[in-house]
Image: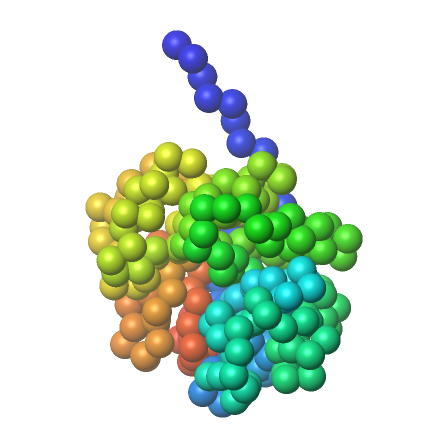
Amino acid sequence: MVRRASRPALHCDPARLRAERGRPLILGHRGLPGALVENRVEGFLAALAAGADGVELDVQLAADGVPVVIHDSGLERTTGQPGRVADVGSGELARLGVPRLETVLDVLPTEAVLNVEIKDFTPRDRGLERSVVALVKVRKAEGRVLFSSFNPLALARLRRLDPALYAAQLTAPGYLRALRLGYLRRPNAVHPHLSELTPARLAAWRRRGRRVIAWGADTEKGLAEALAWDLDGIITDRPAEAVRLAVGPPG
């Protein structure tokens, strides 16, 4: 019988961090949306001040090949300006309020966990993963960075760069095909939408040794439901409420 090679220990392992805290990780989705503009440094700092263990953020390449932190491919919704992220340099994007990833890594405290979502849905390697991983390694931030993507090919590129990187297959209702394709590439983690969780799915992921962090728990009822599951973490628009429910009232 041919045995599969054992996987290396993860640089950043939410299961270990969960065990240390005695509860799932709480990550602010794009920072602290609703109160502040998403994917901005001030929103990330506000989420941490509210008690979150870290934040989730979105990364794509600016026109000059620099990784920047923004969700949409277009600029209008969060900056009020027309145009596409891929057509604008990182300096101009910074003036519009879109931070470079290196700025976020430098400003956020080193104990904060960063879930970096790779926003690239194409099969072609455009260099985003290489640029992001190189930056993370220069900043010696491997121990606090989780990666996720809806694109299983992006995850495969990450794992080729460093097999010890945490690389999670993101899914959403309607995206289970991506998850099945991702299974062919043996992701070490899954980030499902809360609505996709079932006892059978969670048990199957656990049997395969996968870490599981759910997103979409954005109401008090949803947070209570998420905390009842066997999860390593929760990505939420309401990190302060999540921490309160997970930890309990002060004193």
Q: Residue 4, image x and y in percent?
A: 46, 21
The single residue placed furthest to the right in the displayed view is 138
Quadrant holding the N terminus: top left
Residue drawn where x is 43% and y is 79% of the image: 238
Q: Is residue 18 left or right of residue 11?
A: left
Q: Residue 175, image x and y in percent?
A: 29, 55
- Up-down relation of residue 36 to residue 27 (above or below): below
Residue drawn where x is 72% and y is 55% of the image: 135
Q: Residue 212, image x and y in percent?
A: 40, 52
Residue drawn where x is 72% and y is 75% of the image: 91
* Figure quadrant of residue 92: bottom right
Q: Residue 160, image x and y in percent?
A: 58, 37
* Figure quadrant of residue 109: bottom right
Q: Is residue 138 left or right of residue 25?
A: right
Residue drawn where x is 55% and y is 46% of the image: 125
Q: Can residue 227 be seen in this view?
A: no
- Up-down relation of residue 143 to residue 156 (above or below): below
Q: Is residue 128 visible?
A: yes
Q: Is residue 222 left or right of residue 116?
A: left
The single residue placed furthest to the top in the displayed view is 1
Display colour scheme? rainbow
The residue lying toward the viewer, choosing from 76 and 146, is: 76
The residue lying toward the viewer, choosing from 117 and 107, is: 117
